Image (tube, coloured by chain):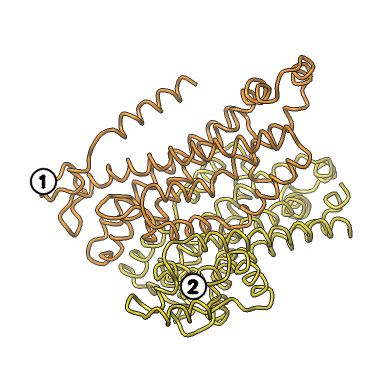
Chain colours: A yellow, B orange
């Protein structure tokens, strides 16, 4: 276990360093002078110089890069240009909302994908299978910014069942979670189907059938446990898709999470905030992937020994 | 292969058709019952114009992503060793950005416009091609004809181009088809956020964005471009599925 753990940790550290570097240089290359943005065009030369100095912008690129790296490590993520708050404060106020939305989307995706995938696997090759896979292809093909407005129109405007956006009531999460989770549900349904089908080929399933177990018992007691392992890994990996999609979904539903914060910050050229949002999302993604890999290795000895 | 040539040719003809006059004209005689937007422009013509934008973005994105990704994947898989190590660590860094995130930030930093959307999506898109090409190259590399070519002192670029690439073209075509759908979706997503194609140019994502403001009184402004986007993506995805099943290609992205 320890050799595998070490190699995974090492590569995660490398990836994090690479992410930090890429984020820094992308935003450093951005056009527009932050000092100009903060002070406006009428500011005097002396004021500009003073601010430049206090922000560390008079240093060379490499010195700024090192300052940025050490700042990230000690939790100093800089000041927002437009809000009188530090980036850390802004993000920590929003991160819970995004995490909650992502978690609810995962729940929705599983609730939807599990029955659909199992139904398709049980009736493989028949019309039920075709229908289920057709539904899943629809789910993959409808982007969240299409599903979102259409659902708002239907459920919030015509039927008046649910709020159009925001997060004031407990029901507010339903529509955004469905919009965000639909693609994940579609992909998971396919994964569950193919994983169950693969497991059903194994010798131990043949044994279970040979000893006279009913098909339902074979499926639920024996096949599903093993079939679920690869599905869990994919769910972990797909979290990235979820976090990326959350940016758009949050904008559609005015959900006050990291995504809306980031898009606002991009529009107002508040680069320290953009930087912080990007870091938080990528770091969460890398962290979850690492945990998924480790959990998988724990559950399936072939991964860490093979 | 011939069929792909014809599809490509048809796309070129379509992309050279100038519809900007109709798409931005204000006239109240529509060719279809799709209605008008808030400025009196025909929704149907704007959907046609948006289709052109989506196609040209997707074609360029797939072309450039494939060029970069396939080259990186071939070299990485064939040469191996420290070259492979370095290239794959770089790929890992790009994979650490979830979904559209990097493209959103890049498009925001570069500023809106067709060229910048293409650039942002290529930066994100090449990684998929690199991974699949590397995996395929690793398996083809073992075959005897590669040993034979090497024994005949054929140079590495020729081996990659003549002896490996033709054998892995089918999975790459499937990846390109899925990538095409993904590029159309991403362009629409960026334009929906206001970071892609700018008005008065039409794009499906931007039509949905503008239309969403009038959702209560004029839902057709959202429904038609949404339907166009859905039908197109569904079609391309089904085609990619069909190709994958026909050529019996295992889905690499599912790990």
Placement of the N terminus of chain A among the 4 image quadrants: bottom right
Q: Residue furthest top?
A: B152
Q: Which mark is residue B166?
A: none
Query: Is residue B81 toward the left or the right of residue B44 in the image?
Result: right
For label 1, the crowd category at 10 Å Cα-Cα, with few meaning under 14, some 14 to 19 and many 20 or more, is: few
Q: Residue at x 79, y 20 (%)?
A: B147
Above or below, comparing residue A55 to residue A118 in the picture: below
Q: How many marks?
A: 2
- Callout 1: residue from which chain? B
Frontmost of labels 1 and 2 is 1
Query: Is residue B225 toward the left or the right of residue B144 in the image?
Result: left
Please state the horizontal and vertical placement of residue B225, each as a whole percent of the image: 31, 50
Above or below, comparing residue A303 to residue A272 in the picture: above
| Snapshot quadrant of residue B219 | bottom left
Q: Residue at x 38, y 39 (%)?
A: B56
Please state the horizontal and vertical placement of residue B1, each as a whole percent of the image: 50, 21
Query: Is residue A234 toward the left or the right of residue A259 in the image?
Result: right
For label 2, the crowd category at 10 Å Cα-Cα, with few meaning under 14, some 14 to 19 and many 20 or more, is: many
Are the numbered discs 1 and 2 placed on the same chain, yes or no? Answer: no
Closer to the camera in the image, B254 or A41: A41
Q: Residue furthest left?
A: B28
Marks 1 & 2, CB-CB < 8 Å contact = no
Q: Residue at x 70, y 25 (%)?
A: B156
Q: Which mark is residue B29?
A: 1
Secondary element at tag 2? helix
Residue where numbered disc 2 is placed = A173
């Amino acid at each position: 276990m320890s050799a595998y753990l070490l190699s995974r940790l090492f590569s995660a550290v490398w990836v994090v360093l690479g992410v930090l570097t890429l984020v820094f240089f992308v935003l450093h290359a951005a056009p527009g002078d932050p000092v100009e943005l903060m002070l406006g065009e009428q500011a005097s030369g002396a004021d500009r110089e003073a601010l430049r100095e206090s922000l560390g912008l008079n240093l060379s690129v490499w010195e700024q890069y090192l300052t940025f790296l050490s700042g990230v490590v000690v939790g100093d993520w800089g000041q927002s240009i437009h809000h009188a708050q530090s980036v850390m404060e802004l993000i920590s106020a929003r991160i819970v909302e995004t995490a909650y939305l992502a978690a609810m989307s995962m729940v929705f995706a599983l609730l939807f994908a599990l029955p659909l995938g199992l139904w398709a696997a049980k009736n493989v090759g028949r019309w039920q299978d075709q229908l289920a896979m057709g539904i899943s292809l629809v789910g993959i093909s409808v982007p969240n910014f299409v599903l979102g407005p259409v659902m708002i129109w239907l459920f919030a405007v015509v039927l008046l069942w649910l709020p159009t956006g925001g997060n004031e009531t407990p029901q507010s999460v339903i529509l955004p979670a469905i919009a965000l989770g639909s693609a994940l549900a579609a992909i998971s349904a396919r994964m569950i189907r193919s994983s169950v089908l693969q497991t059903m080929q194994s010798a131990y399933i043949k044994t279970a059938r040979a000893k006279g177990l009913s098909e339902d018992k074979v499926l639920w007691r024996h096949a599903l446990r093993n079939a679920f392992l690869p599905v869990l890994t994919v769910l972990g990996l797909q979290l990235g898709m979820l976090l990326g999609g959350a940016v758009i979904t949050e904008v559609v539903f005015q959900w006050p999470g990291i995504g809306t914060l980031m898009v606002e910050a991009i529009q107002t050229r508040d680069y320290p905030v953009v930087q912080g949002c990007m870091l938080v999302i990528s770091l969460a993604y890398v962290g979850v992937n690492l945990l998924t890999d480790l959990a998988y290795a724990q559950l399936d000895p072939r991964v860490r020994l093979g | 292969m011939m069929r792909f040539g014809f599809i490509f040719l048809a796309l070129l003809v379509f992309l050279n058709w100038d519809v900007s006059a109709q798409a931005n004209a204000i006239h109240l005689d529509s060719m279809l019952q799709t209605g008008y937007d808030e400025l009196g422009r025909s929704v149907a013509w704007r959907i046609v114009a948006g289709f052109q934008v989506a196609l040209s973005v997707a074609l360029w994105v797939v072309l450039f992503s494939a060029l970069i990704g396939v080259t990186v994947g071939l070299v990485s898989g064939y040469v191996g060793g420290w070259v492979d190590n370095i290239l794959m660590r770089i790929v890992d860094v790009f994979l650490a950005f979830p979904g559209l995130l990097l493209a959103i930030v890049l498009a925001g930093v570069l500023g809106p416009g067709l060229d910048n959307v293409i650039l942002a999506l290529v930066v994100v898109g090449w990684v998929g091609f690199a991974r699949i090409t590397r995996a395929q190259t690793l398996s083809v590399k073992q075959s005897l004809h590669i040993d034979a070519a090497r024994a005949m002192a054929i140079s590495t670029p020729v081996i990659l181009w003549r002896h490996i690439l033709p054998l892995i073209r089918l999975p790459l075509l499937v990846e390109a088809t899925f990538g095409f759908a993904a590029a159309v979706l991403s362009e629409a997503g960026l334009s929906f956020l206001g970071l892609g194609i700018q008005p008065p140019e039409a794009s499906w994502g931007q039509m949905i964005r503008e239309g969403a403001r009038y959702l209560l009184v004029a839902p057709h402004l959202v429904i038609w471009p949404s339907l166009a986007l859905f039908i197109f993506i569904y079609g391309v995805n089904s085609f990619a599925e069909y190709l994958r099943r026909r050529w019996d290609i295992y889905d690499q992205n599912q790990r």
